[in-house]
Amino acid sequence: MNKISVNVYILKQNFDVEPIHLTASKQEKHVRLLMIQDRYDDEDCPGDDDDDEYIPINYHYVWIKNLSRLVSSQFSNHNRKKFICDRCLHYFHSSDKLTSHEEDCSSINKCKVLLPNEKNNKLTFINYSKKEWVPFVIYADFECVLKPVAEARAYSVHEAFSCGLYLKCNFNDELSEYRCYRKVNDNDMSPSEWFAQNL
C-alpha cells in the first residue's frame, strides 16, 4: 500500500480554517486537504424548521500547498513566517519549537483547542430546553491546610482537614441533607475517606 497520511480542514463561513479529520500517524508523504462548500447555512443561528425546501450543499476538496499561508491571518497581522502545528493549529516562530511541540501534541490533542479571547471569555449555557433532569445532585467542598515541604520543586502540600457535602433531591426536598466532617486528631479518619464512605 501507499504510505500516505491525510489531514482534512474545513473552511468556515467567516473564512476560518479548522481541522475536521486528523490522521492517527503522520507518514512520510503527508497531504493536507481543504474542504470548501458552495453554500453556507447561517452558522450562528439555528435553521428555520418551517423551511421545507432542501437545498443540497456541494463539497469540494483542494490541496493545501502551504498551511502557514492559509491560516496565518487568523492568528496575527504580522507578516513573519509562522510554523503551524497540523493538529491544533497553534503557531511557532521556529521549526525547533514546532518539532518539540508536535511530539506532545500528537499524543494529547485530537482536535483544535480554542481558548477564550478578551471579547469572548464567558462560558454560558443557552439551550435550557435540552438540559437533562437529574434526581440527585451532590455539592461537596474540602477545606485544606497548606503544609510546607522540604522538596526542591514543591513549596507546600494541601492536606484536607474538613469536608462538607450537600445532597440535593430534586423530587422530594425532605430527602435533601447536609453532612460535614472535621479531622480532630492525627489518628482520625481522613476527610477523603469519610467522603468516599458517605457517597
Image (cartoon, rainbow, N blue to C red):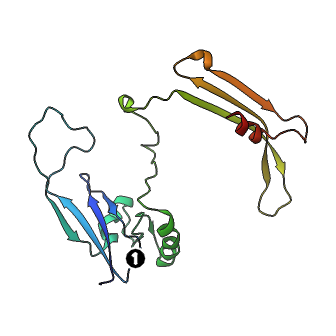
- Nearer to me, 71 or 192: 192
**Badge 1 density bin: few <14, some 14–19, many ≥20, Cα 10 Å:** some
The vertical placement of 193 against 171, above or below, is below
User: Is residue 27 toward the left or the right of residue 62 in the image?
Assistant: right
Q: Secondary structure at mark 1?
A: loop
User: Is residue 98 toward the left or the right of residue 59 in the image?
Assistant: right
- Residue kind at label 1, given as amino acid type: Lys
Q: Quadrant of residue 85?
A: bottom left
Residue at 87 percent across and 38 percent down: it is 188
| Count of labels in the image | 1
Residue at 50 percent across and 68 percent down: it is 107
Residue at 49 percent across and 29 percent down: it is 134
Quarter of the figure that contains the C terminus: top right
Q: Quadrant of residue 87?
A: bottom left
Find the residue positioned furthest to the top.
Answer: 174
- Nearer to me, 2 or 35: 2
Q: Which residue is mark 1?
A: 26
Residue 44 horizontal/vertical position (percent): 28, 41
